[in-house]
C-alpha cells in the first residue's frame, strides 16, 4: 500500500485547532486596485436593483486585480455598498472561490468528492501534489500554481475531473494532469477539454465578475458523454413524439418505440 | 408508445456551434416564446400546469403550480430566478445543457416571466464552471441584439431583462432561499419559510425560483402543447428528462428519456457496467438520495416509484459503483462533502456532519470502535428531519442507506482499513486499462 | 387582533394570532429550552434546541418536528414538548449533545458558569457521559471584539443573537458571521474603528460564555453576587438596572427587564458607568486658613450653619439634576422654609432660562408621553435632541418602531448624524435657534409626537415656538432632559419662583460677593460658563457643598459635607415620561443622605425640615407626584417666538451636544468604554469657503480663546452656516471660526466625505 492516497485518522481527517488562516490577511495591505477598478466595482453595483447584490461579482473582480480578497478590496466593497466591513468579510469567507491568500497564475482544482475520488481523483491529487511540491490550499513558490481539493463540479460523467482556472479538464489521469501542468509551466497553451485555452485564474475571475472576455465561442458544444444518449437516439432514429396537431400531417414521424 | 430516448433538450447539442442563436433558431428556437406571446399569460401558465412538468431540481414540485402562487395583486415587481447552481454530487445535467444550448434557458426564462408577470430574471450559475457562464452570458447578449430581450420583445410590448449572476462556490446556494440570500449579496444561508419566495423572495418581492432544466423544458411545451408533453412519462410523472449516468459504466453521460425509464434500460444504453465488473450500488438522484442496489434495477425512475422503493428521484443523477468500490470510503467522501458544504447555520447539520466524518474516518482507517456503526445511526437519527433545510437530510440518507445495505463493510472498519478490503486503485478510471496493458504485456 | 386556541402538552392556551408557540408555551409556564430564541429578536430557528412535536398543525394533519420559536400558533394546533413527547425529547437531547461535542468543559473558569443556559440544560437534561470521543474544535482565544468585549469562539453555539442585535436593535453591525459550516464563527471588523453605544448588551444576551465583558471577566461568580434591581442614574431614560455586588463592591450592572422602558437592553454608559463609586468622600471638610481640613460631622455642620447664619446676604441653592426626588425635596424645603429664599434651581446646566422655567412649569404637569406611545405614533419629530447620545432608550424604541411599525422620524438637526441614519430619519437641516420656524413648516397631526431636548432651552424662543406649533397641530409634546434627577427635582420644587434667581443669576450674584451658595451634586463643567462658575465660587461669601465625590465644586467650597452615594440609598427618579422609578440601595445604606444632612443643618439653624425619615420624604414626594397629575397643562407663554439664528448672516455658529460616552462624563470615570472619535462637521459650502479639506484636522475657535481640534467631515446635509463638534465647551449658537490645524500641507483626506 505504498501509494495509499488517503490515510485517515481522526486527527488527519479534521484539523482540531482552527487557526486564523480563515480570515482575510489584514497584514498584507498591498493592492493594485486603482481608479479604474473602483469605477468597475461601481459599474457592477449599478447592474442590480439593489447594489448589494453585486457583492459577489465585486469580490470576483477584487481577486482578479489583487489575486486574493485584499483588505483594500474589502474596504472598497464596503465603501461602495455602504455596508460594514464585517459583512463583506462574512460573505467573502462563506464562498470557497474567494481566496484569502494569493492564487497562482493557474489555479488547479482536483475533485475529491466520492465519485471522482473513487474514479481516481485521489491518485491525481497525490500525483499533482508530488509534482508541484505543494499541498491542498497552497501555492508554488514561483506563484505559478495554486492547488485545491475541490468538491463536485457537475461533470461526474467525465470523472475524474480536474479544473484549471475553473475550466474543465475532463477524464483526467495522473499522467495527463502532470503533462498539462508541465505545458503550462513551460508557457505552452493548454486547452480545456470543454472550453478555451486556459486563460489564467485572474483573467477568469474578471470574466466571472461580469466582464466579457470574448471566449464564449471557443471549445466544443459538448464532450462525448454529453452526447452519449443523443448519439444512440440518432443511430436508432429515436425521437420525442411529434406534436399532436402535426400527427395527422406526418404520422410516419411517430415511430414505434424501441423498447 | 414513446421512444426509449426522447431528445428534446439535447436535440441540438451535436449541431455545429449549437450554442449560437442562429443554430438555435434554425432548429425551432424561440417558436415557443412566439407562441407564448400570442397567448394570455394565464393561458401560458395553464399550458405548463397541464403539461405536468415538475421541478427538475430534485423536489419535483409542479412547475406551473409554483408559478400560480405568485400573487398578481402584489404591488412589488415580480422576479424569476433560475437555479443553475448545480452542485449535488452526481448531478451534471444543467452544466452540459447550458454549455451546448444556452438559448434554451433564455427562451424558457422569457416565457416564465411572461406567464407570471415578471420583467426581470436572474440566472444564477455556480461560479466554478467558467465556460458555462461565458456561454449563457453570450446567449443573453445575442438575444438582446436580436430584440429577444429588453423592450418590446418580438413586437409584443412585453419587456424583460436577464442578468447572469456567477456564484462563488457554495452547494447550499442550490437551496432556493439560500440562493436568494446569495443573490442579494449575503451569505448563502437558507431563510425561514414562511414567507415563501412566491410571496417574499428576492428583495422581499414575489419570486419564482426554478431549476434550469425545468425552465429549459418550457419552450418545447409551448411549441408542442401540454398534451404532447403529458403523453410522455408515467401517470403522475409526466414528460421527459435528462438522466445522468456516471461512474463505473461503459459510456457515462446524458440520456434524455421519458420519466419512468428503468435503470436497467439506461444501463443497457450506456453499455453496462465497465467490462469485467458488476453493479454494486447506485444513487437514483444524487448523493442525497438513499442508494439503490441491483435489486432496484427495474424500478421505474419516476417520482412515485422511486419514493415507493425507499429513495428519491432527485436530480436523476445515477452514480454507478461497481464491486471494487468501498462503501465506507464513498460514504465518508459524501459526508465530508456535506460537512464542507453545511452553511453552519443550524446545529444538527453543522455538528452532526462534523461528528459523522470523524466516525466514518476511523471506520475507513480500520480504527473504528465497536458500537461505531450504531453511533452513526444514532447521530443521523438526531439530525434527521430536525435541520433548518434539507441538506442534513441528504447527508443522513447517504449514511443510513449505505449502512442498511452494507453494514458488514462498516463493521469491518473496526479492524480492517477499507483500502485493504477494496484496493482503491482498482476502482479508478484507468484500472481496467492498466489491467489490460498488464495482460497484454504478459501475453 | 383575533385569538387562537391551541393545546400544548394537553393544556389549552389562548394567544393572539401570530404568537409563536414558544411564547404561547411560556404563557402557561411550559418551558421549552432554547438558545437562539430571544423575544425581542426576529426568529432565526438556528439552534434547533426548541424542537417540538406537532401531531396536529390545526388542520388535522401532523408536521415533522418544528422549532417552537419560529412556529406560529394556529387554532386547534396540538403541540407536544419534551414533557409529553418522546419525539420532542429525543430531538432536544440530541441537539444538546450536538452543541456540547465541540463545547469546552471550562465551566469552572467561564464567566457564564452559574448563569449559563447551556450549562443549566446540560446538567438538567444532558447525558452524564459524553459519547463524543473525537478532538474538540478549538481556537486561539480570546479574540478582542471591541475594547470592552471579548470572544471565546469555541464556546459559541452560533445562535446569532449578537449579530441579530446589531442588525435589528442597535443598528451597529460590529459583528458578522464569518466562515462556513463547522468553522463558522463570529467575526468583527479587524480594524476595529466602529463604536456602538449598546455593545454591552451582546455580553448579556449571549446564551453561553462566548462574548464576555472585559470589565467583568474573572471578577466574580454569579452565585456569589448579590443582585439589586434599581433605576439607572446615568440619564433620564428610566432604565431598570440590575446591579450585582460582592463584598460591598459593585461588580457589574446589567439591563433589567422592563418592557415599559428599556425592554431588555441598556446602553454602555448605564452598564459600565459605575466605577465612579470608588472615590467617594469619606470625611466632612472645613476650610481653615484657606485650606480644606477634615472635620467631624458636628464640627462641619456647625461650621456650615454658622457660615450661613452670619452671612448678611442672601443664600442661593443649586441642588443639581442628579438627585432622587426625596433629596431634591429636602433642598426645596431647605431653601424655601429654612433659608427663606425662592432662589433654588436644579438646572445646573446650560439653557436654564426663564423661558424654559415657564415651559417646564407647564410641562411637568399632566400625563406624559410614554415609550409605548412612541411605538404607536405615526410620526416622531425630534427637536434639539439626538436620542442616541442624549437618551439612548428613546433611540432604541424609535428604531424598533421604525423597523417594525413603519414609524417615520423627522429630526430638526444641524447635521445628519449616524443616529439619524440608523433611524432612517428625515433630516431637516436646522441651525441652533431655527428650530421653531422649522417646526412651524412641518406637517404634523394628532399622531405626531414632538420630543424636544434640553438643549432647546438655550436659545430664546424655541420652546415657546415649539409649544405653539404642537398645539396648533394637535400633536403631543414631551421634554427630554439628560439627567436622571432633573424632572423629579422640578416636581419637588427646585425651580426658581417669584423673585427667585435662576442658576446663572445666582452665580452672577455670587461672583459679586452678594450671594452665598448651597450646592448639591453640581459639575461646574456642565454650566453655561464653567470659568465664570469657578470664579463665582471663589468670590462667593460662603459656599456649602454636599457631594459624594471630590469635584471642582468641593475644592472651592468652604464646607464640604459628604453625602451617601446613590448605591447606598433608596429613592425615586422621575424619567422623561413623567413616571417615577424606584432607586434601591445596592450596598449597605449610608445614613447621611442629602436629606439627612440638610435636616441636620436645618436643626442647627433652628428649623425643622419636616422630613425626619426616608419614609416621610418618600411620602411627601409621592404626594407631589400625585398632585402634579391632577394639574392640566395650560399652554401659553409670554415669551417671544424664536428669532432667526445667527447662521444666516454669513457667520458660522456652533452646534453641539454631549455625546453619550464622552470621556468628560463623570459617570464614566474609570470605565473602559470607547467614545466615537471626535469630528468637526460642516456643510460643503462652509468647507469650501474656509478652504478646508475633509479628513484633515480642523481647529474650532470660540469665545474666550479656547479651541478644539478634530478631523473634518463634510456633510452634504448640514445646515448652512453651522459647525458641529461633539462636547464643545460653548453653548449651541455660539459664533465660532474654523481654521486648518496646521499650515503644513496634509495628506489626502481619507473618506472624510459623507
Image (tube, helix red, strand yellow):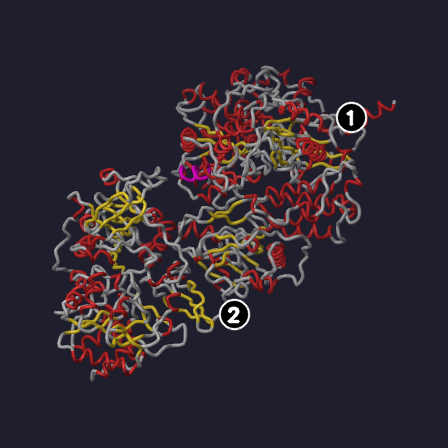
B260 vs C264: above or below: above
Outermost residue, right side: B443
Check the residue under mark 2 and report the chain it is in.
C
Q: How many marks?
A: 2
Q: Residue C391: horizontal and vertical position, in percent? A: 32, 58
- Dot 2: few (<14), some (14–19), or many (≥20) neighbours within 10 Å? few
Front-most of residues B175 and A256: B175
Query: Magenta residues, as a range?
Result: A73-80
Magenta highlight on residue A74? yes
Determine the secondary structure under disc 1. helix
**How far apart in space, not on screen, are marks 1 and 2 (Cα)?**
72 Å
Magenta highlight on residue C184? no
Determine the secondary structure under disc 2. helix
Residue A233: which quarter of the image?
top right
Q: Mark 2 points at which residue?
A: C223
**Quarter of the rendering occupied by the N terminus of chain C:** bottom left
Q: For this view, does A94 lie left or right of residue C532?
A: right
Q: Residue B362: horizontal and vertical position, in percent? A: 73, 47
Q: For this view, does C445 lie left or right of residue C642?
A: right
Q: For this view, does B283 lie left or right of residue B209?
A: right
B274 vs C473: above or below: above
Check the residue under mark 1 and report the chain it is in.
B
Q: Name the residue under label 1.
A: B433
Residue found at x 17% / y 80%? C309
Residues flagged by tags 1 and 2 on a common chain: no
Q: Residue C246: horizontal and vertical position, in percent? A: 47, 71
Q: Residue C595: horizontal and vertical position, in percent? A: 28, 77
Residue B324 appearing in the image: yes
**Quarter of the rendering occupied by the C terminus of chain C:** top left
Amino acid at each position: 500500500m505504498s501509494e495509499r492516497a488517503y490515510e485517515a485518522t481522526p486527527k488527519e481527517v479534521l484539523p482540531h485547532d482552527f487557526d486564523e488562516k480563515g480570515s482575510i490577511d489584514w497584514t498584507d495591505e498591498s493592492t493594485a486596485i486603482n481608479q479604474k477598478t473602483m469605477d468597475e466595482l461601481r459599474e457592477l453595483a449599478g447592474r442590480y436593483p439593489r447594489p448589494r447584490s453585486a457583492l459577489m461579482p465585486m469580490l470576483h473582480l477584487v481577486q482578479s486585480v489583487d489575486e486574493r480578497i485584499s483588505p483594500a478590496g474589502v474596504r472598497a466593497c464596503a465603501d461602495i455598498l455602504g455596508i460594514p466591513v464585517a459583512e463583506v468579510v462574512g460573505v467573502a469567507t462563506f464562498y470557497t472561490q474567494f481566496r484569502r491568500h494569493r492564487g497562482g497564475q493557474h489555479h488547479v482544482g482536483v475533485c475529491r468528492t466520492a465519485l471522482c475520488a473513487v474514479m481516481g481523483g485521489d491518485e491525481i491529487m497525490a500525483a499533482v501534489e508530488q509534482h508541484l511540491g505543494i499541498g491542498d490550499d497552497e501555492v508554488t513558490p514561483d506563484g505559478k500554481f495554486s492547488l485545491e481539493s475541490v468538491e463536485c463540479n457537475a461533470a461526474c460523467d467525465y470523472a475524474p475531473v480536474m479544473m484549471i482556472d475553473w475550466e474543465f479538464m475532463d477524464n483526467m489521469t495522473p499522467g495527463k494532469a502532470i503533462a498539462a501542468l508541465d505545458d503550462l509551466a513551460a508557457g505552452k497553451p493548454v486547452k480545456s477539454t470543454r472550453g478555451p485555452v486556459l486563460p489564467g485564474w485572474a483573467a477568469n475571475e474578471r470574466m466571472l465578475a461580469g466582464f466579457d472576455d470574448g471566449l464564449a465561442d471557443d471549445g466544443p458544444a459538448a464532450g462525448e458523454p454529453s452526447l452519449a444518449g443523443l448519439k444512440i437516439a440518432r443511430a436508432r432514429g429515436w425521437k420525442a413524439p411529434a406534436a399532436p396537431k402535426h400527427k395527422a400531417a406526418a404520422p410516419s414521424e411517430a415511430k414505434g418505440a424501441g423498447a | 408508445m414513446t421512444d426509449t430516448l426522447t431528445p428534446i433538450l439535447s436535440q441540438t447539442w451535436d449541431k455545429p456551434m449549437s450554442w449560437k442563436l442562429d443554430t438555435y433558431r434554425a432548429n425551432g428556437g424561440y417558436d415557443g416564446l412566439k407562441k407564448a406571446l400570442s397567448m394570455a399569460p394565464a393561458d401560458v401558465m395553464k399550458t405548463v400546469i397541464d403539461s405536468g412538468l415538475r421541478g427538475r431540481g430534485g423536489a419535483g414540485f409542479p412547475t406551473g403550480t409554483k408559478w400560480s402562487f405568485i400573487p398578481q395583486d402584489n404591488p412589488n415587481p415580480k422576479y424569476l430566478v433560475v437555479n443553475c447552481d448545480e452542485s449535488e454530487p452526481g448531478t451534471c445535467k444543467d452544466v452540459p445543457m447550458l454549455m451546448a444550448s444556452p438559448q434554451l434557458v433564455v427562451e424558457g426564462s422569457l416565457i416564465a416571466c411572461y406567464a407570471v408577470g415578471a420583467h426581470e430574471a436572474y440566472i444564477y450559475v455556480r461560479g466554478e464552471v467558467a465556460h458555462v457562464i461565458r456561454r449563457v452570458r453570450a446567449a443573453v447578449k445575442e438575444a438582446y441584439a436580436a430584440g429577444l430581450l429588453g423592450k418590446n420583445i418580438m413586437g409584443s410590448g412585453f419587456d424583460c431583462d436577464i442578468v447572469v449572476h456567477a456564484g462563488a462556490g457554495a452547494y447550499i446556494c442550490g437551496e432556493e432561499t439560500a440562493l436568494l440570500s446569495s443573490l442579494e449579496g449575503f451569505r448563502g444561508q437558507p431563510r425561514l419559510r414562511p414567507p415563501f419566495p412566491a410571496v417574499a423572495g428576492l428583495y422581499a418581492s414575489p419570486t419564482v425560483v426554478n431549476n434550469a432544466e425545468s425552465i429549459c423544458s418550457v419552450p418545447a411545451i409551448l411549441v408542442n402543447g401540454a398534451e404532447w408533453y403529458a403523453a410522455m412519462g408515467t401517470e403522475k410523472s409526466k414528460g421527459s428528462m435528462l438522466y445522468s449516468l456516471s461512474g463505473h459504466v461503459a459510456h457515462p453521460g446524458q440520456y434524455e428519456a421519458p420519466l419512468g425509464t428503468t435503470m436497467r434500460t439506461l444501463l443497457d444504453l450506456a453499455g453496462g457496467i465497465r467490462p469485467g465488473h458488476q453493479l454494486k450500488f447506485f444513487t437514483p438522484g444524487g448523493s442525497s438520495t438513499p442508494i439503490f442496489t441491483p435489486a432496484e434495477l427495474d424500478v421505474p425512475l419516476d417520482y412515485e416509484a422511486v419514493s415507493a422503493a425507499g429513495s428519491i428521484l432527485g436530480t436523476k443523477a445515477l452514480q454507478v459503483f461497481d464491486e471494487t468500490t468501498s462503501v465506507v470510503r464513498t460514504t465518508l467522501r459524501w459526508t465530508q462533502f456535506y460537512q464542507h458544504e453545511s452553511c453552519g447555520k443550524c446545529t444538527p447539520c453543522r455538528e452532526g456532519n462534523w461528528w459523522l466524518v470523524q466516525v466514518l474516518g476511523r471506520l475507513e482507517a480500520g480504527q473504528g470502535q465497536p458500537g461505531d456503526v450504531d453511533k452513526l445511526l444514532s447521530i443521523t437519527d438526531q439530525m434527521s428531519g430536525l435541520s433548518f433545510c434539507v441538506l442534513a437530510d441528504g447527508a443522513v440518507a447517504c449514511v443510513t442507506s449505505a449502512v442498511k445495505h452494507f453494514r458488514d463493510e462498516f463493521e469491518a472498519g473496526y479492524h480492517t482499513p477499507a483500502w485493504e478490503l477494496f484496493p482503491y486503485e482498482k476502482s479508478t478510471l484507468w484500472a481496467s486499462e492498466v489491467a489490460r496493458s498488464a495482460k497484454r504485456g504478459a501475453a | 387582533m383575533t385569538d387562537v386556541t391551541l393545546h400544548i402538552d394537553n393544556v389549552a392556551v389562548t394567544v393572539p394570532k401570530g404568537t409563536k408557540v414558544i411564547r404561547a408555551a411560556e404563557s402557561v409556564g411550559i418551558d421549552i429550552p432554547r438558545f437562539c430564541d430571544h423575544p425581542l429578536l426576529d426568529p432565526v430557528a438556528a439552534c434547533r434546541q426548541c424542537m417540538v412535536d406537532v401531531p396536529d398543525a390545526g388542520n388535522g394533519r401532523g408536521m415533522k418536528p418544528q422549532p417552537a420559536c419560529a412556529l406560529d400558533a394556529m387554532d386547534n394546533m396540538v403541540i407536544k414538548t419534551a414533557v409529553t413527547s418522546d419525539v420532542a425529547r429525543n430531538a432536544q437531547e440530541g441537539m444538546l449533545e450536538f452543541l456540547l461535542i465541540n463545547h469546552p468543559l471550562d465551566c469552572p473558569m467561564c464567566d457564564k458558569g452559574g448563569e449559563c443556559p447551556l450549562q443549566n440544560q446540560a446538567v438538567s437534561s444532558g447525558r452524564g457521559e459524553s459519547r463524543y470521543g473525537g478532538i474538540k474544535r478549538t481556537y486561539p482565544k480570546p479574540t478582542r471584539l471591541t475594547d470592552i468585549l471579548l470572544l471565546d469562539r469555541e464556546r459559541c453555539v452560533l445562535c446569532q443573537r449578537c449579530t441579530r442585535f446589531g442588525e435589528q436593535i442597535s443598528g451597529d453591525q460590529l459583528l458578522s458571521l464569518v466562515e462556513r459550516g463547522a468553522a463558522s464563527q463570529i467575526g468583527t471588523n479587524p480594524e476595529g474603528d466602529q463604536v456602538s453605544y449598546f455593545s454591552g448588551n451582546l455580553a448579556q444576551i449571549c446564551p453561553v460564555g462566548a462574548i464576555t465583558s472585559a470589565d467583568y471577566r474573572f471578577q466574580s461568580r454569579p452565585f456569589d453576587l448579590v443582585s439589586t434591581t434599581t433605576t439607572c442614574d446615568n440619564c433620564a431614560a428610566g432604565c431598570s438596572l440590575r446591579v450585582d455586588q460582592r463584598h460591598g463592591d459593585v461588580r457589574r450592572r446589567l439591563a433589567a427587564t422592563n418592557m415599559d422602558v428599556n425592554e431588555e437592553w441598556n446602553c454602555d454608559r448605564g452598564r459600565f458607568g459605575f466605577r465612579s463609586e470608588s472615590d467617594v468622600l469619606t470625611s466632612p471638610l472645613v476650610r481653615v486658613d484657606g485650606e480644606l481640613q477634615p472635620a467631624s460631622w458636628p464640627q462641619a455642620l456647625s461650621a456650615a450653619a454658622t457660615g450661613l447664619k452670619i452671612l448678611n446676604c442672601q443664600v442661593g441653592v443649586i441642588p443639581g439634576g442628579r438627585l432622587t426626588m426625596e433629596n431634591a425635596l429636602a433642598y426645596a424645603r431647605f431653601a424655601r422654609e429654612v433659608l427663606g429664599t425662592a432662589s433654588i434651581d436644579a438646572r445646573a446646566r446650560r439653557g436654564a432660562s426663564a423661558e424654559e422655567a415657564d415651559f417646564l412649569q407647564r410641562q411637568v404637569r399632566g400625563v406624559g408621553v410614554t415609550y409605548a406611545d412612541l411605538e404607536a405614533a405615526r410620526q416622531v419629530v425630534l427637536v434639539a435632541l439626538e436620542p442616541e447620545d442624549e437618551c439612548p432608550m428613546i433611540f432604541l424604541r424609535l428604531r424598533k418602531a421604525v423597523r417594525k411599525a413603519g414609524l417615520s422620524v423627522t429630526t430638526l438637526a444641524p447635521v445628519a448624524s449616524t443616529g439619524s441614519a440608523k433611524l432612517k430619519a428625515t433630516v431637516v437641516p436646522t441651525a441652533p435657534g431655527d428650530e421653531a420656524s422649522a417646526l412651524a413648516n412641518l406637517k404634523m397631526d394628532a399622531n405626531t409626537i414632538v420630543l424636544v431636548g434640553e438643549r432647546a432651552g438655550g436659545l430664546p424662543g424655541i420652546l415657546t415656538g415649539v409649544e405653539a406649533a404642537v398645539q396648533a397641530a394637535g400633536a403631543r409634546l414631551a421634554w427630554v432632559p439628560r439627567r436622571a434627577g432633573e424632572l423629579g427635582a422640578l416636581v419637588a420644587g427646585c425651580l426658581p419662583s417669584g423673585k427667585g434667581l435662576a442658576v446663572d443669576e445666582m452665580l452672577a450674584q455670587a461672583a459679586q460677593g452678594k450671594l452665598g451658595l448651597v450646592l448639591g451634586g453640581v459639575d461646574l463643567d456642565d454650566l453655561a460658563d464653567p470659568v465664570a462658575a469657578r470664579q463665582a465660587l471663589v468670590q462667593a461669601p460662603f459656599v456649602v457643598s454636599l457631594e459624594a465625590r471630590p469635584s471642582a465644586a468641593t475644592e472651592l467650597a468652604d464646607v464640604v459635607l459628604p453625602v451617601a452615594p446613590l448605591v447606598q440609598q433608596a429613592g425615586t427618579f422621575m424619567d422623561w415620561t413623567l413616571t417615577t422609578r424606584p432607586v434601591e440601595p445596592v450596598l449597605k445604606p449610608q445614613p447621611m443622605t442629602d436629606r439627612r444632612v440638610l435636616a441636620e443643618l436645618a436643626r442647627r439653624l433652628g428649623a425643622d425640615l419636616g422630613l425626619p425619615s426616608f419614609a416621610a420624604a418618600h411620602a411627601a414626594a409621592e404626594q407631589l407626584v400625585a398632585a402634579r397629575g391632577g394639574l392640566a397643562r395650560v399652554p401659553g407663554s409670554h415669551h417671544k417666538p424664536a428669532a432667526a439664528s445667527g447662521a444666516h448672516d454669513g457667520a458660522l455658529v456652533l452646534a453641539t451636544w454631549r455625546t453619550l460616552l464622552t470621556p468628560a462624563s463623570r459617570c464614566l470615570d474609570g470605565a473602559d468604554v470607547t467614545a466615537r472619535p471626535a469630528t468637526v462637521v460642516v456643510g460643503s459650502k462652509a468647507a469650501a469657503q474656509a478652504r478646508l479639506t475633509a479628513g484633515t484636522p480642523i481647529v474650532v475657535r470660540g469665545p474666550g480663546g479656547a479651541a478644539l481640534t478634530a478631523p473634518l467631515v463634510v456633510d452634504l446635509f448640514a445646515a448652512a452656516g453651522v459647525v458641529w463638534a461633539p462636547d464643545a465647551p460653548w453653548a449651541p449658537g455660539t459664533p465660532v471660526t474654523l481654521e486648518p490645524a496646521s499650515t503644513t500641507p496634509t495628506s489626502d483626506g481619507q473618506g472624510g466625505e459623507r
